[in-house]
Amino acid sequence: MIELLFSAEAWAALLTLTALEIVLGIDNVIFLSVIVSRIPEAQARRARQIGLALALIFRILLLSLLVWLIGLTQAVLTLKGMDFSWRDIILIGGGLFLIAKATHEIHGEMEAREEAGDRASGRSAFFWVIVQIIIIDMVFSLDSIITAIGMAQDLAIMIAAVVIACLIMYVSSGPVAKFVVEHPTTKMLALAFLVLIGVALVADGFQFHIPRGYIYFAIAFSAAVEFFNVLAKRNRKKAPN
């Protein structure tokens, strides 16, 4: 363990894996920001804390069960000549859940069934938010950790990278969620991202890998356009009539 502190290779692996885990955590942050936007701010803060704590716990738990996790990649079902593992089935189910959830939210926004600023309240709403966070945390954690196993061989490095990434997710989730609430158009954009991510998860489950670089580039480009749109709108409001 001590020798890892003085190993350049270990530090390089830690930095690389941490960067990868942060990028993969973008999905988690977007989902959290959207899903908590319908409950009061106090509950939303608690939901974010619980959600990210669960994300960390799931990731460390999966890392400690490497033998079981590797077993999830073995074929358990064959349909029309295509083999499916438990990982594939979980990714397909999680992707379909994301697509369905995002589509439902988009429908609600388009129908404008709620007044602007109105949020669901009560224990029931909070409970269902936590349930949805748990479901998607499990899917994202599985995908994230299987990727980590392929990049690093030392369990201590993988756990350190996951903890650092989750801390950064925790720090960034609050400002992102606040921005989504204050700028309704960004919520629609975030929902579109979730549909895109859901499609990518389903494709992975069917063993058709869509390079994540394409998806993250699309997200970054759209987010940049929306940022300048929000900035221009703010400047127009400040400009004298």
Image: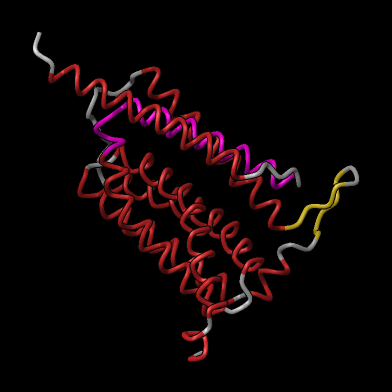
Q: Residue drawn 55% across and 71% down?
A: 13
Q: Is residue 174 above or below residue 196?
A: below
Q: In terms of depth relative to the viewer, which is nearer, 19 or 25?
A: 19
Please determine whether, in this image, residue 47 is positioned above or below residue 145.
Answer: above
Q: Quadrant of residue 181?
A: top left
Q: Nearer the viewer, residue 73 or 217?
A: 217
Q: Is residue 189 magenta?
A: yes
Q: How many marks?
A: 0
Q: Residue furthest top?
A: 241
- 123 falls in the magenta region: no
Residue 62 relative to residue 207: left or right: left
For residue 172, above or below residue 57:
above
* Residue positioned 75% across, 57% down in the render: 85
Q: Which residues are magenta?
A: 179-206
Percent position of residue 209, x then y: 71, 45
Q: Residue at x 48, y 86 (%)?
A: 6
Q: Mainly helix, strand or loop, the magenta region?
A: helix
Q: Position of residue 49 (x, y in %)?
A: 31, 58
Quarter of the image with the C terminus is top left
What is the residue that sits farthest to the front in this orientation?
Answer: 8
Drawn side of residue 201 relative to residue 35, left or right:
right
Colouring mode (rainbow / by chain / secondary structure / one colour): secondary structure
Observer-nearest of 210 and 94: 210
